[in-house]
């Protein structure tokens, strides 16, 4: 009973939606993420049920305490560096910021990657606005400007509050201190991205082809994309214990078009009735008014059931597939179309045939790629291990906090977002102005 109460407490704390009707093997199933079809910020694997054993709760509590300590320490460093640079003519070198946070060369390279074009700025950039954003933060707010501390006190709708809280975990780690002054930043919350951003702006994801543009990545909506990674060890088995099968279950997110490349509807149209017994794909829930998806619904799968298969298909929905992170962290090998969206995972660093088995955007070669994996079992296992090794760089919570803090520090040092009633852009028209700028 204590274990159940602990899981309920964790779900409330993280904003998860529980389904306590399916307790099994000493654990409780829960929905993996928020479901809000209005904002399109639906977890692409909302139907996939994770598994938390009661004995895991002590570890989760320790990790939460460690994260809070890391955030508090990082906040002090951010404040010190930003305030020391307030009147400096030129921004700090990224390497100097990394040294102050104790980051090694690999982690510092990630800081530069997340910053995009801003990492290479040798001068400070000024953005003048008539005023900062005020009111409730929603996905319809588009690009908006707000003071970083004001952000943490601003109201937000349920979907955007997840983003707001993730950003403010570092900023509010040491409550009661007026840190970071009145520095402001530009944000865009939700799954959608713009074709062009004329000012450096914080996003959760960006198009791969725009990774060197004005899209600055932060670890936003963390629990949706990373929350289940920690449950993999308790649900996974060794490669030799897995069945030779490719599986996929997911919600009908993304474009509801069975004839458009790289859509979940195309995937299920082609393989829901596959004659190959090694391929098992289907929706476990029809969402976002995609009525056609109802014809392709199958019973859902627990993480344990999915990871009992050697091959895990990763399919993009509204945004990046939220299951990619835990699939890579497992002993199974991911099958996926070459990613075109980048997140905190830095998908641009993933290589076909090294970290995953590639498939064509129209899924036409799925059967032949499964056959290759069957005939080259040792190579497939090697790819699965390389993907798991790739995920090790994200494992240290303090390092992840320091990397995010370094990104925020570099942004606030390089950007001067200020109000100017005479010549500034009206905040409500900020995105329109950006998109209309050549």
Image (cartoon, grey):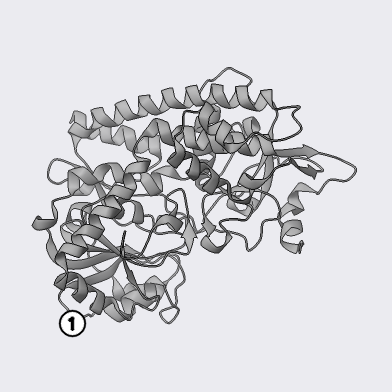
Is 43 left, or right, of 216 in this rendering? left
| Disc 1 target residue | 275
Is 66 left, or right, of 192 in this rendering? left
Q: Position of residue 347 (x, y in %)?
A: 43, 56
Q: Quadrant of residue 2?
A: top left
Q: Is residue 325 visible?
A: yes
The image quadrant where one finds the N terminus is top left
Q: Residue at x 39, y 59 (%)?
A: 321
Q: Position of residue 318 (x, y in %)?
A: 46, 62
Q: Position of residue 217 (x, y in %)?
A: 54, 47
Is 58 left, or right, of 127 in this rendering? left
Is 205 left, or right, of 363 in this rendering? right
Question: Considering depth in this image, is 411 or 265 the residue closer to the camera?
Answer: 411
Q: Quadrant of residue 134?
A: top right
Q: Quadrant of residue 64?
A: top left
Question: Considering depth in this image, is 385 or 232 the residue closer to the camera?
Answer: 385
Q: Residue at x 66, y 61 (%)?
A: 196
Q: Residue at x 85, y 40 (%)?
A: 420
Other-residue count near label 1 (Cα within 10 Å), few / some / many at <14 / 14–19 / ≥20: few
Q: Is residue 162 visible?
A: no
């Amino acid at each position: 009973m204590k274990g159940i109460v602990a899981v309920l407490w964790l779900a409330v704390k993280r904003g998860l939606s529980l389904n306590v009707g399916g307790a099994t093997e000493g654990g409780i199933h829960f929905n993996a993420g928020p479901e809000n079809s209005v904002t399109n910020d639906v977890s692409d694997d909302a139907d996939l049920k994770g598994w938390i054993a009661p004995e895991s709760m002590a570890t989760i509590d320790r990790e939460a305490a460690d994260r809070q300590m890391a955030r508090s320490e990082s906040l002090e460093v951010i404040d010190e560096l930003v305030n020391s640079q307030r009147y400096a003519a030129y921004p700090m070198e990224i390497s100097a910021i990394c040294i102050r946070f104790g980051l090694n060369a690999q982690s510092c390279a990630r800081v530069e990657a997340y910053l995009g074009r801003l990492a290479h700025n040798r001068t400070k950039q000024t953005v003048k606005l008539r005023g900062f954003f005020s009111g409730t933060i929603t996905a319809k707010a588009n690009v908006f400007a707000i003071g970083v501390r004001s952000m943490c006190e601003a109201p937000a709708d349920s979907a955007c509050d997840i983003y707001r809280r993730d950003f403010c975990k570092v900023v509010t780690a040491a409550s009661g201190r007026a840190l970071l002054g009145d520095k402001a930043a530009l944000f865009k919350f939700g799954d959608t991205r713009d074709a062009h951003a004329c000012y450096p702006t914080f996003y959760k994801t960006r198009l791969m082809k725009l990774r060197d543009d004005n899209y600055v990545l932060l670890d936003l909506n963390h629990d949706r994309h990373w929350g289940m990674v920690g449950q993999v060890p308790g649900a996974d088995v060794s490669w030799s214990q897995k069945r030779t099968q490719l599986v996929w279950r997911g919600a009908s997110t993304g474009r509801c078009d069975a004839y458009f490349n790289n859509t979940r509807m195309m995937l299920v149209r082609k393989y829901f009735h596959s004659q190959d017994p090694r391929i098992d794909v289907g929706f476990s829930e029809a969402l976002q008014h995609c009525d056609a998806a109802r014809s392709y619904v199958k019973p859902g799968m627990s993480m344990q059931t999915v990871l009992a298969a050697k091959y895990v298909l990763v399919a993009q929905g509204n945004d990046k597939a939220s299951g990619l992170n835990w699939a890579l962290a497992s002993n199974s090998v991911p099958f996926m179309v070459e990613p075109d969206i980048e997140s905190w995972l830095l998908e641009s660093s993933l290589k076909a045939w090294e970290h995953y088995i590639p498939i064509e955007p129209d899924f036409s070669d799925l059967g032949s790629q499964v056959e290759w994996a069957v005939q080259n079992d040792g190579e497939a296992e090697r790819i699965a291990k390389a993907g798991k090794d790739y995920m090790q760089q994200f494992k240290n919570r303090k390092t992840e906090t320091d990397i995010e803090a370094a990104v925020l520090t570099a942004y606030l040092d390089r950007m001067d977002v200020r109000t100017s009633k005479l010549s500034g852009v009206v905040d409500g028209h900020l995105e329109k102005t950006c998109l209309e700028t050549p």
